[in-house]
Amino acid sequence: MKNPQKKPKFDFEELKAAATSLNAKIRKKVFEEYFERFEEFPSYLFDNTNGIDSRLQETIKDLQSDPEISKTMRKGIETLMQRLPSA
């Protein structure tokens, strides 16, 4: 019997570095992978106290404009937007 493929070990520091990267493509990829794994987005990595962090906002817009993302991910974006402060 073969072992099912294990998910890679979760590394918080690596996640935070990639999710908050200045590179928009890296952030988008991390957000997609995180959503596939946890069915939510890592918005907690950003300081959204006084409105949505600009990098988070840019990543959300990149995801929304991508015709390839799933309906489930679009629903996740809607849920995220309801939780975040409006500014």
Image (cartoon, rainbow, N blue to C red):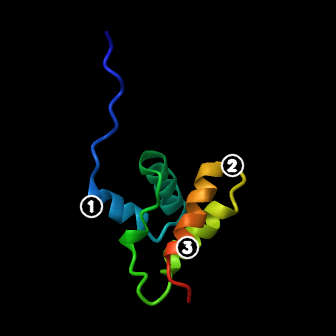
Classify 10 Å Cα crowding around label 1: few (below 14), some (14-19), many (20 and above).
few
Residue denoted by label 2:
68
**In this view of the protein, can residue 69 be seen by the observer?**
no
Residue 62: image location, x then y, percent: 63, 65
Q: Is residue 2 left or right of residue 58?
A: left
Tell me if mark 2 has few (under 14), some (14-19) or many (20+) residues whose alpha carbon lies within 10 angstroms of its own. few
Task: Give the quarter of the image for residue 78.
Answer: bottom right
Regarding mark 2 in the picture, which secondary structure is present there? loop
Q: Which residue is mark 1?
A: 13
The answer to whether 51 is drawn above or below residue 82 in the figure is below
Q: Position of residue 77 (x, y in %)?
A: 58, 63
Q: Nearer the viewer, mark 1 or mark 3?
A: 3
Is 15 located above or below residue 10 in the figure?
below
Q: CA distance from mark 2 to mark 3?
A: 23 Å
Q: Of marks 1 and 3, which one's residue comes earlier in the chain?
A: 1
Of pointers 2 and 3, the one earlier in the residue sequence: 2
Q: Mark 3: which amino acid? A: Gln
86 up-or-down from 23: above or below? below
Q: Amino acid at mark 1?
A: Glu
From the image, tell me which residue sits under label 3: 82
The secondary element bearing badge 3 is classed as: helix
Q: Amino acid at mark 2?
A: Glu
x 61%, y 58%: residue: 75
Compare residues 6 and 76 and report the one nearer the observer.
Answer: 76
Residue 8 spot, x, y in % from top left: 32, 40
State which quarter of the image contains the C terminus: bottom right
